[in-house]
Amino acid sequence: MFRFSTITGSLLLFLALAMPLNAQVIEGVVLNDEGKSLQDAHIVVEKSGLAAITGKTGTFSLNLGEIFSDSVTFTISRVGYQTESYTVYLNNSDERFITIELKESVYTSEAVVVTATKTLKDIEEVSLPVSVITAEEIRQSGSMRLSDVLSEQTGMQIVNDHGTGIQVQGFDPDYTLIMIDGNPVIGRSAGTLDLTRISVRNVEQIEVVKGPSSALWGSEALAGVINIITTGNREKASGGLTTRYGENNTLDLSGDLSLGGKGFNNNFFVNRNSSGGYRLNPGSVSQTVPEFENYTLGYRGNVEITERLQFSGNLRWFNESQENRSSAISGDGQTVLLNSQDNRTDFMGRTEINYNPADMLDINLSLLTSYYGTDSQLTATDSGEFFSATSFNQFFNRPELQSGYRWSGKHHSLAGAGAIFERLDAERYPSQPSFTTKFLFAQHSWTPSPEFEVTGGLRYDTHSEYSSQFSPKISTRYRAADWIQFRASAGRGFKAPEFRQLFLDFTNSTAGYSVFGSSTVAEGIEKQLAEGTIDRILIPLENLNEIRAESSWALNGGFDLDPFQNIRLRVNLFRNNVSDLIETAPVARRTNGQSVFTYFNVDDVYTQGVETEFRIQFSQRLRGSIGYQLLDARRKIERERTVQNELGEVIQQTDISFEPMFNRSMHSGNFSLFFENGSGWGANLRGTLRGQFGLFDQNGNGFVDPNEYEPGYMVWNAAASREVGNTATIQIGADNILNYINVNQPHLAGRLWYGQLSIKF
Amino acid sequence: MHNLKIQYIFILAAAFILSSCSDSTTGADDELISEIEVQTVEDLHAPFDRENPEASAFVLFNLRTGETVDNDQAESDNWDIGFRGTSIIVNSGSSGPGSAGAVMLDVAFDEVEIAPTEGYRQDSDDEAAIKGSGGWYTYTGEGNPPRAVISHDDTTIILKTADSKHYVKLNIMSYYKGNPDYNTEEFANFRTRPESQFFTFKYAIQLAEGLRDLK
């Protein structure tokens, strides 16, 4: 694995040194008007097709060959800057190293993003549909947790199943990869990664890439990737304190501190978030959202040993305790009231070495280690007697080597390799399984002109428990004119089978059925055969295929339209063809009449739709946006039906059709209006609409019938803020102003007033 | 007839039956006139006491007269179909002396135009001709609405009457008093959910003997 990458790295290095050193070479540097070097500026020589691109230090080198006799004219362009042209007289030897200064264009791009290509890149130059949520937007909205922020984004739907998750392009939360600073967050229950675990108080920006990104990021990046970039790289000492208090006794306290200087910086973050919880169903014993208290500690820092060698580190620790009530039927048939105590912890640490042996070559070696653990305990409310306890521990380690090379001119390559070592320690998985994934990936971008780019990538994952995955992806962008840019991409994504699908070993002690994971089923059935509890084997063990990862092929295509300087319309069409979704099916019959189940790749699904976003800057003070997603998500349904032929006689018929899926809204949208008067006052109004969606399968046919739709709803949030002096901001707001409450939408607590105070220094 | 209310709707259809359709049972000269009667029976109470199963008898129903039949006539072919809790029997096999039969189709009531000639099943000790869970209803279990018996709109039961002379199509519309909407808070809540074991069903019977047309 590692040999591959070393060879690639050496090869790239060799090519870099082997560049011909001809006499007619022009070298130079491109800077902005503050003297900062500009990477990715395009230098195109007129009437020749010769071109160069600037590297990390803003420098470039142009080999002119023998074609030009006296002078050469070239244009220098970069997104976000005004294009310049420059003429060099070749007989003037002083002009062999030139300095070009570019002025920022009136229209400034939103951000620089990393998630689309694993390379820092201007968002306008990325060939995938990427959107960025800025720190400013998060601050103005008074958002505390990741779920608060994502609920207001176009094409994203908060859904609840063992936690608060996100639905992207009609996919369940299982299929979106969540990362913090490029590191995957682990710890999912029933597929959902609970977004309330992640505080957004120390966030610089949140990057969202829609469509499969497994070609770069591997498993889980099937519907998309959400990457939270935390605050870092501040060069001066700075800090802040934020406190928010609201109804339900919700308190959020945050502090951050950045200490930076020449060649190093350290960023510290601490957050405490607690709530008294709430109850949407007045009759129930349990609270809908229980009383909780959590802490997050974060650190991010780096140190420059030399200009070409950097060390960086990233740490995150999160702990939450919850208290709730429930009831159970005890052995003697009595209902016992129980107190439940739940605790969860996650930890993530990453160290990284960045080395630039040559100007155009980056080598990055990193080690990520993660842990996620939960334990819960039930005790009788009256007697305090112990009732039951469960625990779950997951360990994840990932070494990775990555190298990137900018070929002179139009090409940029990236290649990497790594391995993931995982281990589980939980009652439900008695074998305490450990397993390994090894992966290789490569990506190449070709930018023949600033207007046009093609990026291709692929990744190969080989796993110890399921079949290997090959994930290619290709994307392109074309700026046809100043006011329009097109994007299109095609690729494959996959999601590794869940732990239970691989390793479960469960026999229900009262009903007497068994469920095994695909890696434990053979052993489990052999054991039951030996015990004499198997009556009949329905599918011979040797006919069981190795389980495959759930996977999807997808197409995304769309455009950004800028008819005026203050208006942007973004449209993206998508289609995902998903296959091999994993479901349980019986594999043997037990002597007690019950079945033995295991997991199979059976289901097919497709999702398609259009996402549009319209942003308008009315004036310096007022901006607004409207977003809308049209979604059509359908599952393949095979039905054995008893019908009649033309003569009226009874026949059996298998109907195959694609039918609407539950919990998907065909229509959804959002609206926002942000106002700032320039002298310290600010206000905003944000609304999200969720159209009707199927929630409960009353007749058990597996799809939404016309009478199974729940009405849609709209949620409005508003906030107003006032700056006091230069350092403090007071904010007052209300979430869910119209007090929409629905037992089936537990993340909506009803109207919540809050006040917030933040101080920056 | 206590709380049983019956609505009669007569549909007289002067249908011309081609001789090729009926030449097996009638002479080529006979022209049978289709006469279809459509009825809706509301809130037929068919209690089943789980604690005391012997005490709950099936509520027997004659589809030809549209009336319930006393249990002392159980050993006759004066009834076609019987209800008790979620169980439905037909007058044949292990349930009665008649020669009733049933075919369950995964087709909506209005779409069934003709009865099949064969495939009619009788009750046996192992299996009822009219399948309950997964047949005429779905039990929602822990879903929503919880622990409810939801009748299927798109399941139609084709019956032969106990005297084997008439074809009937039948759809169970509800198992709850007042045929309530399943999609309400009121129905989801056990305290406000209407009483169960009250059948509302509609059926269409072909009064012309032996004629299979049902529309």
Image (tube, rainbow, N blue to C red):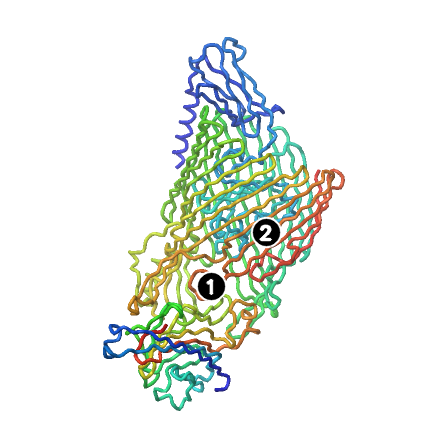
Residue A504, relative to residue A49: is it above or below? below
Q: Which quadrant is the N terminus of chain A positioned in? A: top left
Percent across and percent down for residue A250 are 66, 54
Residue marked by disc 2: A688
* Closer-to-camera residue (A533/A73): A73
Percent across and percent down for residue B165 are 31, 81
Q: Amino acid at mark 2?
A: Thr
Do we see residue B125 in this rendering? no
Q: How many marks?
A: 2
Percent across and percent down for residue B170 are 39, 75
Q: Amino acid at mark 1?
A: Asp
Residue B177, relative to residue A205: is it above or below? below
Using the rendered view, name the quadrant where residue A312 is placed: top right
Q: Which quadrant is the C terminus of chain A positioned in? A: top right
Using the numbered discs, state the Cα–Cα distance from disc 1 to disc 2 in whole angstroms: 26 Å
Q: Earlier in the sequence, mark 1 or mark 2?
A: 2
Using the rendered view, name the quadrant where residue A615 is placed: top right
* Closer-to-camera residue (A242/B208): B208
Chain of the residue under label 2: A
Q: Secondary structure at mark 1?
A: loop
Q: Secondary structure at mark 2?
A: strand
The residue located at (42%, 12%) in the rendering is: A66
Q: Is residue A255 left or right of residue B149?
A: right
Residue marked by disc 1: A697
Percent across and percent down for residue A566 are 61, 36
Residue B177, relative to residue A714: is it above or below? below
Using the rendered view, name the quadrant where residue B39 is placed: bottom left
Q: Is residue A758 left or right of residue B153?
A: right
